[in-house]
Amino acid sequence: MLGFNFTRLDVPWPNVDWVRVWDVGCDWSRIHVGPDEYDWSLLDQVVARAEMINAKVIYTAHGTPTWLAVNPDNPNNAPWMPPGANSVPTSIDEWNKFIWNLTTRYSGRIHAIELGNELQLADFLYPYDDETLSTWATMTWRAHHTIKSIDPTMVVIGASILPRESSGGIHRATKWLLHLADRAWPVDAMATHIYPLVGENYPEFADYYDAARDAVIQNGGPHHMWITESTFDLGGPVMDDAKAQNILRKVLEKHKGFVFWYAYDRPDLGGMSALFEPGTLAWSELELYRN
């Protein structure tokens, strides 16, 4: 399986097996423009583009609309997101309406829904306390039941946990996992994001993955783990192509499925991401593991 995060529509998309919809401008905060009012135009384009390359789609449902945010002036909000996107909503019913409309509109075209993104970071959820996490767990429980009532085949994935210490690590992630456990784990799988720091290589990737998987299982969660974002040396110098190929070979020997690489269309991010382009050794290694 070859999965990718694409962040732009104005570049060619090479053939991949899965596309993760996030950071492309059609998150919840931009679609749900008012009570019972939705703008699906950009997501329609993204899903159509994925279909053109015969890729399945995972949609990341995150980003509270400003008009619905408990605190539209929430501090630490990601600057590329609308104000209050890192807040919880004033009404879970409105969230559930969005999920109902999303699932109904794209049943059979979107194949998985990831219910949240990087809750451990204030960019995406603030404050990170029991009350806020309890609300997000309830949102997950409601969404799971809504999605399955419409499309039982759609995979429901819990919001990504971040094992790297600079993101709070497993200790911080466990606070979220405990709230999911309190709701009897209303997900089919969990997500994790793995970003080894500059200068690190495969062993750190493996350690992060094992830590995330073990934390979920030890708290009674599902054994299925999707790595919905990953790359190496993000933000650093462009990695040597042969080194990238070697690292990818080690990663994919263990994790052949459900790794979504970030991001082919952002060479400015440096590291390995700058090599995710057809014709490189790194890309040729990825293609070996497509099926």
Image: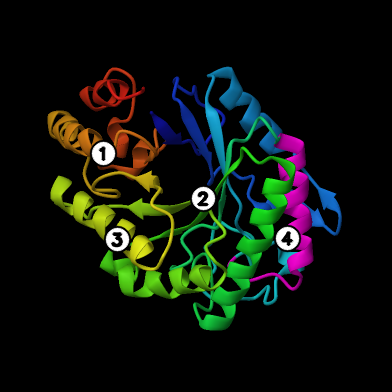
In this rendering, the label closer to the viewer, 3 or 1: 3
Q: CA distance from mark 3 to mark 4?
A: 30 Å
Observer-nearest residue: 145 or 194?
145
Tag 1 or tag 3, which sits nearer the N-term? Answer: 3
Tag 1 or tag 2, which sits nearer the N-term? Answer: 2
Q: CA distance from mark 2 to mark 1?
A: 30 Å
On residue 214, the disc is 3
On residue 188, the disc is 2
Tag 4 or tag 3, which sits nearer the N-term? Answer: 4
Q: Is residue 271 above or below residue 200?
A: above
Residue 107 can be seen, yes or no:
yes
Q: CA distance from mark 4 to mark 2?
A: 20 Å
Tag 1 or tag 4, which sits nearer the N-term? Answer: 4
Q: Is residue 84 left or right of residue 180?
A: right
Q: Are marks 2 and 1 in contact (CB under 8 Å)?
A: no
Q: Residue at x 58, y 82 (%)?
A: 131
Report the amino acid beneath label 3.
Answer: Asp
* Picture coordinates of residue 204, whole percent (x, y): 17, 53
